[in-house]
Image (spheres, rainbow, N blue to C red):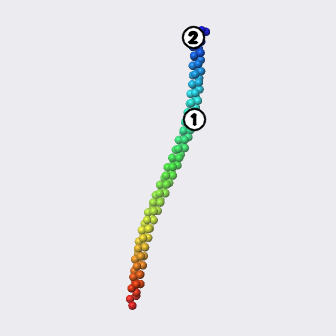
């Protein structure tokens, strides 16, 4: 073989070796990408589960707040009724005191 053919053969062999390295690298990167996509999918699933859990907890929290608000409303009404009773009792007490101060009229 003369030198130009040998040079071409050597160049082709180097190109083939380089192509094989590139193919191996591509296979490795593709495998790594698949693994990373799997990890990403798992993370998204866990995030979705967490969001669903938080949404349920938020719904329960909203229900509790509504119940607490209803309780507070009832307590406010009861407090107002209690204040009215105290005012009536105070009026009665004042009337009794007035009667006692006047005596029995004899």
The C terminus lies in quadrant: bottom left
Q: Viewer-proximal residue, 4 or 85?
A: 4
The tag earlier along the polypeptide, 1 or 2, is: 2
Disc 1 packing (10 Å; few <14; some 14–19; many ≥20)? few
Say which residue label 1 marks. 35
- Picture quarter containing residue 7? top right
Q: Position of residue 24 (x, y in %)?
A: 59, 26
Does residue 74 lie above or below 23 as drawn? Answer: below
Q: Which residue is drawn at the image coordinates 49% and 57% (left, top)?
A: 64
User: In 3D space, how far apart are the residues under numbered discs 1 and 2 (Cα atoms)?
Assistant: 46 Å
Left-right relation of 61 to 5: left
Q: Which residue is drawn at the image coordinates 59% and 17% (left, top)?
A: 13
- Residue lying furthest top: 2
- Residue lying furthest bottom: 106
Q: Position of residue 102 (x, y in %)?
A: 39, 85
Say which residue label 2 marks. 4
Q: Which residue is drawn at the image coordinates 56% and 36% (left, top)?
A: 36
């Amino acid at each position: 073989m003369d030198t130009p053919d040998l040079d071409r053969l050597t160049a082709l062999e180097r190109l083939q070796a380089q192509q094989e390295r590139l193919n191996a690298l591509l296979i490795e990167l593709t495998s790594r990408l698949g693994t990373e996509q799997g990890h990403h999918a798992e993370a998204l699933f866990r995030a979705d589960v967490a969001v669903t859990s938080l949404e349920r907890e938020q719904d329960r929290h909203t229900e509790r707040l509504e119940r607490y608000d209803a309780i507070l409303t009832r307590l406010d009404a009861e407090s107002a009724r209690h204040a009215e009773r105290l005012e009536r009792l105070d009026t009665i007490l004042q009337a009794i005191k007035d009667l006692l101060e006047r005596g029995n009229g004899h």
